[in-house]
Amino acid sequence: MPLKGNLLVGQSGGPTAVINASLAGVIREARRHPEITGLYGMANGIEGLLQGRIADLSQEDEEALALLPHTPSAALGSCRKKLSDDDYPRLLDLLRQHDIRYLCYIGGNDSADTSHRIAARAAEESWDMRVVGVPKTVDNDLAYTDHCPGYGSVARFNALATRDAALDSAAMYSVDPVKIVETMGRNTGWIAAATALAREQPGDPPHLILLPERPFDPEEFLRAVKHQVDTGRGCVVVASEGLRDAEGNILVSFQHPLGTDAFGHRQLGGVADYLVGLIVEGLGLKARFDKAGTIQRVFGLAQSEVDVAEAEMVGAAAVARACEGVSDQMVTLERVSREPYRCQPGLAPLEAVANAERPLPDEFIADHGRDVTPAFIEYARPLIGAPLPRYARLRMAPVSR
Amino acid sequence: MPLKGNLLVGQSGGPTAVINASLAGVIREARRHPEITGLYGMANGIEGLLQGRIADLSQEDEEALALLPHTPSAALGSCRKKLSDDDYPRLLDLLRQHDIRYLCYIGGNDSADTSHRIAARAAEESWDMRVVGVPKTVDNDLAYTDHCPGYGSVARFNALATRDAALDSAAMYSVDPVKIVETMGRNTGWIAAATALAREQPGDPPHLILLPERPFDPEEFLRAVKHQVDTGRGCVVVASEGLRDAEGNILVSFQHPLGTDAFGHRQLGGVADYLVGLIVEGLGLKARFDKAGTIQRVFGLAQSEVDVAEAEMVGAAAVARACEGVSDQMVTLERVSREPYRCQPGLAPLEAVANAERPLPDEFIADHGRDVTPAFIEYARPLIGAPLPRYARLRMAPVSR
């Protein structure tokens, strides 16, 4: 007999351009299962849940639901709450009170950890409930999955933005010979790496891609920048916000006038500023930086349609698997075909996902450490969806006189 | 008898998303006039021209020309060269050598100044040549024109980016209660003002728009931020890079660890960092910033189709007017109808354009100085082209128990 009761869905961690597509997938699939009697949403994830902020999603109108997959950021609201031991009893009470038998939590490692702990606690208390995680993170750093929904779109934004910003630099190299494009990526270089997809021809920008997986060496960096600037076509550098020196220290933290913020967190994002200073002082060259910040992870116009479709697919799969009896697992993406590219949903234990972080593997990083490999391009290209729009390249044939 | 000879076109100053549409307009119109015998382009504006770097645009293939209007940045290359008195004789020699009878220079104030001086010099030397300027600047600060090609697209990007970044903030307000979006605009607030177009309903973000036209008051700012944060929905602040204090000093110049760069120029763009510091120290709140930098002015996907069409129109009009005998003038945009919106090309003397800068007028700035007025919205809305994509707004009706 199927398990009858309500489904509760929540969104957690940094928003993405497609986390609402996963929500739409959850809602679409939940409606197909008569055993799911009510459809509830946490306002602001488990933080809101603990405050009793639960929305009845059956009251949303169809128009809003239709717009959901193409609406960026987390429509339910998100959070970064880490549950304390004291929170679990209250949480379980709430789940019982609302007869929650299906729980889908959309998020990254931390959310997988939370979901696993809730599943374990429910089992201890004999509350029959199925918990299935839905992967989401622009960082693309979850293990056990080919990639993470959200990554394809942030990759598409950064490929587009880097290509356009590099065209700007190419036109203005006599004014601004060096441009830094800072991307997200606190611990891993997946997002920065994706800017390599901006290239159409060998030698196209970005000229350097700086990854947290490789220690930053200021002298080597300045040599590489000078070498590129000397070609007379300007230099475009992509830098991950989480770039570290040989000792593992995040660059810039000790240079920044503000240092650590009031909460003791380092607000990253000062790497570009640091690199600009290095270039100005070390090479006497003008440099400027672009740092799209949170814009990159939620820019609706840059949604990858592959990413949207997969985000919806994993949301729907989580509900379908839960209805089949699966619990304490996260839905993954398995690449079942390279050409044509195709992924299908798989499963991995929430606990395993929670405890792993996947950096860029060595085979995706060029030997000199300042670029990606063709293997990375092959991996990442299908994730950004349609090819980037084609642009004019003028021949600029010198006038014959 | 029509003046027979070659046409030379150049692009100058900061690139935009549509400066190539103006180039396409120049090329299209030039081909319609048999008196224009050759079609030449300056590589990197007058800087390249002085080096004899002139391209024969008749050798470009049709496919490249067809892609040109939707290719961002300056395809001919750009520059920020200010001519010295010594440059003019060499320049005139080059124009004579290449039998340039038509000169179209696409740019802002500085380019208008350059064009006017070239026209005056040619007249002095009795070189019969027509010089017509084509307006271009994301800053929208040229006088004598309703607006400037390039502005509609940077406005569209920033409206889209601010709306999406604000959705991100709304989902994450418990983690990052304050977000700063820094826009371009060294002397004027036109670009920052355009982020007001992100709003669909009253009270929608951005909550504060800081303009260089009004002196920045730190205490007033912190009060306004705190007031908004206290509503429990987070605070999104848009700040122009050229924000100034009551004494007219650019904010942050004295705080920035790098100070002035190697060339004595202040690299602006530290305003967001300054505001983050102010909020952390003054309110004890976490804050982060997004600074799209040059991405905002050239992001191809955010082209306004109105902007593309008008950029092409003013390029074509410059050639048409020159063929009619006009010289030492810049093409302008005249708004001849509000509803439906329609602009047609007009003319203004290059010298007048060169010597004027148009800040946001008082009637476009709210009395308290931290927002725009409905009159600005009415002015700017048609310039960004199609309405922004519609997004889902969930009702989030509380579960009844």
Image: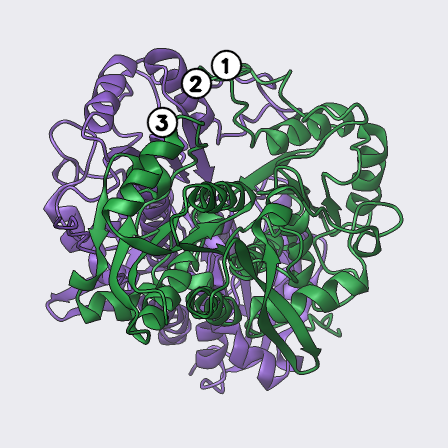
Chain colours: A green, B purple
Q: Is residue B3 visible?
A: yes
Q: Is residue B99 visible?
A: no
Find residue B126 and name its label.
none
- Marks 1 and 2, the one that precedes in the sequence: 1
* Residues under numbered marks 1 and 2 in contact, where contact means CB atoms less than 8 Å apart: yes
Q: What whole-number distance in Å separates the C-alpha atoms at marks 1 and 2?
A: 10 Å
Question: Residue flagged by tag 2: what amino acid is it?
Answer: Gly
Mark 1 or 3, closer to the camera? 1
* Residues under numbered marks 1 and 3 in contact, where contact means CB atoms less than 8 Å apart: no
Mark 2 or 3, closer to the camera? 2
Mark 1 or 2, closer to the camera? 2
In terms of secondary structure, where does tag 1 sit? loop
Question: Going by the image, does A269 lie left or right of B3?
Answer: right
Seen at 13% across and 42% down, the residue is B373
Q: Which residue is mark 2?
A: B277
Question: Going by the image, does A301 lie left or right of B336?
Answer: right
Q: Which residue is mark 1?
A: B255
Seen at 74% across and 69% down, the residue is A378
In terms of secondary structure, where does tag 3 sit? loop
The chain ID associated with circle 1 is B
Depth check, front residue: A313 or B378:
A313
**Few, some or many C-alpha atoms within 10 Å of disc 1 (few <14, some 14-19, many ≥20)?**
few
- Marks 1 and 3, the one that precedes in the sequence: 3
Residue A87 appears at what percent x and percent y?
38, 30
**Few, some or many C-alpha atoms within 10 Å of disc 2 (few <14, some 14-19, many ≥20)?**
many
Is the same chain shared between marks 1 and 3? yes
The chain ID associated with circle 3 is B
Q: Which residue is mark 3?
A: B243
Q: Quadrant of residue B260?
A: top right
Question: Going by the image, does A345 lie left or right of A99?
Answer: right
Depth check, front residue: B216 or B333:
B216
**Few, some or many C-alpha atoms within 10 Å of disc 3 (few <14, some 14-19, many ≥20)?**
many
